[in-house]
């Protein structure tokens, strides 16, 4: 029993049962109070009417008139539910259906509720004592047994209803507990498996819209995100170890060769320059990884502001125009006016710069690269960078945004495989998307970002 009461579902069911019983008590109490008040008022009105009629008969016709009025009232109420007693100043009965003055009624006018034996039946009587002129006293009452029975029935019915509600609540709580606990147990088993390292496990869902199913779907999305992050960390660690091993080994071999060979000043300077290049490459890898970590953590959202893409595109175009001239390639830049997004200006500039840098890097000489910025819908701006290079195969497109992944078509082109990873991370940070498609030949990279709301005019 204690284990059942520890269940949240049972406690909730009991709580609702108690609330139901309390609300029922209030409702029935109000109904009882109104009904009892109505019945009491009706009984009091009948008693006062009889009292007034007897008083008037005593005043007009004297004692014989009052006695006759009482006898007439008793004939009208033959079931014995009425009480009449006219007594003198010594409380000695003169007329009515009582043999003596009731001991429960004091010598003071007012209302009383007493028990009397009438016609061999014990009755509950509501009675009024009235002092009449010439030292007479009058008792007029009515049997209120029906009212008492109605009140008892209401209380009895309410008690049974409260007991039934509690029993049904406990039974319902047990049934709900069994149904809920089965699903909670599934969640516990899945969570325990994940704790033991099985990150591929997911919570079972029924495809419904109930709260537990929605919770399971949300947790599954969270688990998928955690698995992706852990897999990314694992791949990044392996890639970092692989990419750093080569420059560090080359650096050590160069320095060791210079020390052992006693190289000349010119040879040592050349070796130092190569070592610096390797060090710069290692530093670039770490800087890129740190930047990606900042983006993934969402820290850079604090620096969001309105960014005019026209200015950003102009700066990128000015930066890469000399490289395009060296390749005798055409750099086509087109953009609309008053195009802006909310974001980090440095990250957006680096993302667009990475897309243009890749296009310039892989575009052959005497070719073309284009940068277009224009609205694609009422809510999004599209930044499109197209080139005529070797492009990316369909098999590689889903993987090029992974850290340190480099396509086989890249050949000997310099790079560490973090450029498109950073662009994809910047897109996610700004609630945008990065898509890659063929240009026949070449590649089209599309970065879509939400349009910033218009600034209010002053």
Image (cartoon, rainbow, N blue to C red):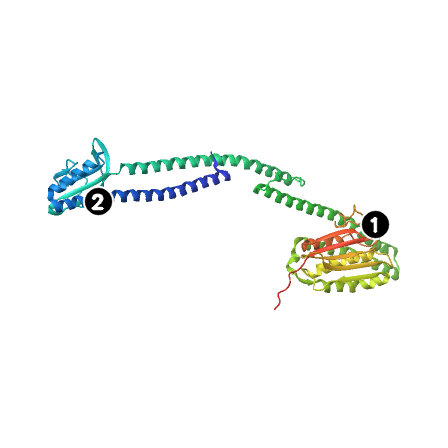
Q: Which residue is denoted by mark 2 in the rendering?
A: 49
Callout 1: few (<14), some (14-19), or many (20+) C-alpha neighbours within 10 Å?
Answer: some
Which dot marks residue 409? 1
- Residue 387, given in percent of the width and then of the height, sits at 81, 56
Query: What residue do we see at 35% from left, 38% from top?
Result: 154
137 or 366, which lies in front? 137
Mark 1 / mark 2, whichever is N-terminal: 2
Query: What residue do we see at 41% from left, 40% from top?
Result: 21
429 or 189, which lies in front? 429
Q: Is residue 166 visible?
A: yes
Q: Position of 150 compared to 402: left or right? A: left
User: Judging from the image, what secondary structure is the residue with disc 2 in?
Assistant: helix
Please tell me whether residue 148 is drawn above or below residue 431 in the rendered image. above
Callout 2: few (<14), some (14-19), or many (20+) C-alpha neighbours within 10 Å?
Answer: few
Q: Position of 129 compared to 261: left or right? A: left
359 or 222, which lies in front? 359
Distance of mark 1 from mark 2, alpha carbons? 113 Å
């Amino acid at each position: 029993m204690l284990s059942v009461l520890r269940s949240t579902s049972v406690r909730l069911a009991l709580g609702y049962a108690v609330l139901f019983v309390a609300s029922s008590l209030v409702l029935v109490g109000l109904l009882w109070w109104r009904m009892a008040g109505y019945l009491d008022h009706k009984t009091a009105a009948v008693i006062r009417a009889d009292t007034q009629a007897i008083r008037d008969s005593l005043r007009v016709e004297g004692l014989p008139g009052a006695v006759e009025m009482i006898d007439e009232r008793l004939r009208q109420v033959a079931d014995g539910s009425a009480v009449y007693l006219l007594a003198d100043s010594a409380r000695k009965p003169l007329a009515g259906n009582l043999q003596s003055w009731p001991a429960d009624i004091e010598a003071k006018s007012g209302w009383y509720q007493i028990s009397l034996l009438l016609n061999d039946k014990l009755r509950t009587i509501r009675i009024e004592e009235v002092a009449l002129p010439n030292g007479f006293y009058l008792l007029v009452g009515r049997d209120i047994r029906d009212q008492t029975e109605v009140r008892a029935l209401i209380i009895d019915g309410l008690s049974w209803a409260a007991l039934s509600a509690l029993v049904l609540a406990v039974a319902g709580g047990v049934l709900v507990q069994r149904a809920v606990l089965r699903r909670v147990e599934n969640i516990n088993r899945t969570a325990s498996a994940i704790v033991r390292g099985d990150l591929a496990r997911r919570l079972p869902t029924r495809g419904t819209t109930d709260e537990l199913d929605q919770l399971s779907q949300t947790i599954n999305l969270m688990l998928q995100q955690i698995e992706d992050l852990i897999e990314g960390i694992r791949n990044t660690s392996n890639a970092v170890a692989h990419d750093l091993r080569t420059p560090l080994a080359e650096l050590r071999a160069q320095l060791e060769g210079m020390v052992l060979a006693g190289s000349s000043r010119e040879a040592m300077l050349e070796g130092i320059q190569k070592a610096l290049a390797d060090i710069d490459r290692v530093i670039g890898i770490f800087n890129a990884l740190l930047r990606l970590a900042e983006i993934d953590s969402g820290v850079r959202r604090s620096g969001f502001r309105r960014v005019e893409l026209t200015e950003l595109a102009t700066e990128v175009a000015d930066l890469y125009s000399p490289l395009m001239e060296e390749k005798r390639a055409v750099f086509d830049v087109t953009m609309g006016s008053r195009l802006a997004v909310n974001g980090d200006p440095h990250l957006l500039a680096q993302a667009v710069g990475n897309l243009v840098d890749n296009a310039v890097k892989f575009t052959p000489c005497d070719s073309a690269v284009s940068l277009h910025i224009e609205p694609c819908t009422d809510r999004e701006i599209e930044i499109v960078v197209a080139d005529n290079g070797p492009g990316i195969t369909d098999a590689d497109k889903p993987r090029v945004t992974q850290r340190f992944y480099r396509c086989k078509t890249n050949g000997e082109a310099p790079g560490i495989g973090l450029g498109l990873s950073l662009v994809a991370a910047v897109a996610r940070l700004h609630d945008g998307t990065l898509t890659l498609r063929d240009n026949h030949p070449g590649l089209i990279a599309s970065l879509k970002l939400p349009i910033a709301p218009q600034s209010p005019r002053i």
